[in-house]
Amino acid sequence: MTKNVKNYINTIFRYIVLIVVGIVMVYPLLWMIGAAFKTNTEIFTSIGIIPKNPTLSGFQKAFQGYGGDIDILKAMINTFKVVIPKVIFTIISAVLTAYGFSRFHFKGNRILFAILMSTLFLPQVVLNVPQFIMYNQFKWIDSPYYLALIIPSLFATDTYFVFMLVQFMHDIPRELEEASRIDGCNSLKTLWYVIVPMLKPAVVSCALFQFMWSSNDFMGPLLYVNTPARYPASIFVKMSMDADTGFEWNRILAVSLISIIPSLIVFFLAQDSFVEGISAGGVKG
Amino acid sequence: MKKRKYRKCSHENIGWFYILPWIIGFLIFKAYPFASSLFYSFTNYNLFKGFSSFGLMNYKKIFETKKIMNSYAVTFKYAFMTVPLKLIVALFIAYILNFKIKGVNFFRTAYYIPSILGGSVAIAVLWKAIFKDDGIVNTLLGYMGIQQQSWLSSRTNALFVICLLRIWQFGSAMVIFLAALKGVPKDLYEAASIDGAGKWKQFFNITVPLITPVIFYNLVTQLCQAFQEFNGPYIITQGGPRESTTLISLLIYNNAFKSYEMGLASAQAWILFIIIMTFTVLAFISEKKWVFYSDDETR
């Protein structure tokens, strides 16, 4: 009987912890949504989420531009101009590289894979200066096509994804590939018709993570995009905060909120893929 | 027979063709910049003027300048506050979620959203709104009748606020822990509880040892990230007040891209790189002592 009571208390304790932590996690986000609809005088005077006098003025002002060159919608379109090619190129280059490493025992495979793994631990901080100097020589800086941000993804430079895909490929049985080879498929056809369909969940999670990471990327555009008309959303949000600090917080929060709507939609549509992707990458590693 | 062997060999070599893009990318975008940043670190390279001298002057300057050394100290403080707290919270919550909890998925989502959005500028902006002096945290403290604090304008509190932003994003570490906890065989717990071990004892004697590989993985990746933190301090505090949140990556950015002293910035980056490497290598060396890989796991 006492054991039951103890279990009961334990269970209640667990739920209390989960709910309290849950509030801490979610409250700031909900507050942000509410605050974007509040008047500037109300925002910091109450901690409630639901606005007393809801107003759209924050959003109206959010859509106004800065000097006519850039506004939040243009900035978000700019973000997509970077993110969409980056996701596509990353997937193609990472799948090819992972296929090469996991299915072909060429000479040097192990050493090269070890090098690839070690670049996972290579801090970007060390590379920033020389990359900037190099991209400057290539005339990639402030390019209207965001070359400095996009081109490297053609070459599987985000090795985390290669690593993740190699992990997944190890779990795909090789019998099917041998069968397809006997049927006369070359290795590229085998990849496309046999491996890629089975790899779909992994490819989806890579695409999702790359989507999130590159839409959130701040350092990249900060270094390589200078013209306001080409600013992606991350830079635009920072700029609008600097421009209005202390005055129009409903506008700043509305801008911020609009900027994360695509990420929120993608997250809620594909939550399970995120969880699977991150667990696979981490646990097997 | 000989011919077949030859053909097999050539088939394996097709692999080179598939990894070729990565090799090119590695050489151009990783290996060359890596080597040249070491070279730049010994020069007074300036983006517009090029360089005129070669030597150890940047490293000398770093060790002699109080401001720069302070910045490394702040970075250490940041990393050693953020990473342990984040991992402890992540493991604790994952441990609780691993019991039969109703609405696991709901809680998991709630905890995970901040990590997914957390890198975005929008969240850093939100953090500023929450912790500014007349921000929402102080309003809340006022309601509860607790002395209001200055957060971002106080030298002692500002760094802590920056740490909190990343600790709040414990979700992805938690998801990894949760997946690992699911892999701990249930019968071990049953055996332990028959032996009379309490929940805490089970946690430290069974759970923790079995998931050390994952703790290790999280520790290394989180340390790597923490030492390079940039967005939080850049957006929320600009390194202030009075340099109390000037993490080294912020200083490197200012030197390289505001005053174009790229030689000095490279040297600072290399010292940071050596620090990160030291911790990574230490982690890998100590791995044998505390990380437990079960025997049946053949990899």
Image: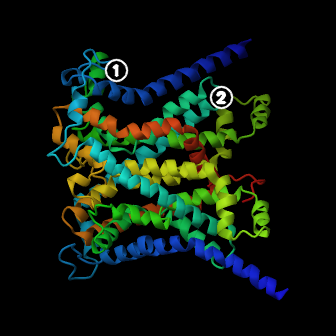
**Farthest bottom residue in view:** B2
Identify the residue at horizontal 33%, vertical 61% (top origin). Answer: A146
- Residue A256 picture location, percent across and down: 30, 37
Q: Is residue A237 left or right of residue A106?
A: left
In the rendered image, the vertical position of residue A137 relative to residue A90, given as above or below? below
Binning the other alpha carbons within 10 Å of mark 1 as few (below 14), some (14 to 19) or many (20 upward) gives some
> What is the chain identity of the residue bearing mark 1?
A
Which type of secondary structure does the marked residue at label 2 adopt?
loop
Q: Is residue B216 visible in the rendered structure shown here?
A: no
Identify the residue at horizontal 54%, vertical 68% (top origin). Answer: A116
Q: Is residue B35 visible in the rendered structure shown here?
A: yes
- Residue B177 picture location, percent across and down: 59, 42
Residue A60 picture quarter: top left
Give the amino acid type for the residue marked by disc 2 in the picture: Phe
Q: Share a chain, discs 2 and 1?
A: no
Q: Looking at the image, which is closer to me, A131 or A54?
A: A54
- Quarter holding the N terminus of chain B? bottom right
Give the amino acid type for the residue marked by disc 1 in the picture: Ile
Of labels 2 and 1, the one closer to you? 1
- Quarter holding the C terminus of chain B? bottom right
CA–CA distance in space, label 2 to label 1: 31 Å
In the rendered image, the vertical position of residue B290 relative to residue B44, given as above or below? above
For label 2, the residue is B99
Label count reads 2
**Farthest front residue in view:** A184
Disc marking residue A49 = 1
Identify the residue at horizontal 59%, vertical 24% (top origin). Answer: B103
Which type of secondary structure does the marked residue at label 1 adopt?
loop
Residue B129 picture quarter: top left
Q: Looking at the image, which is closer to me, A28 or B69?
A: A28
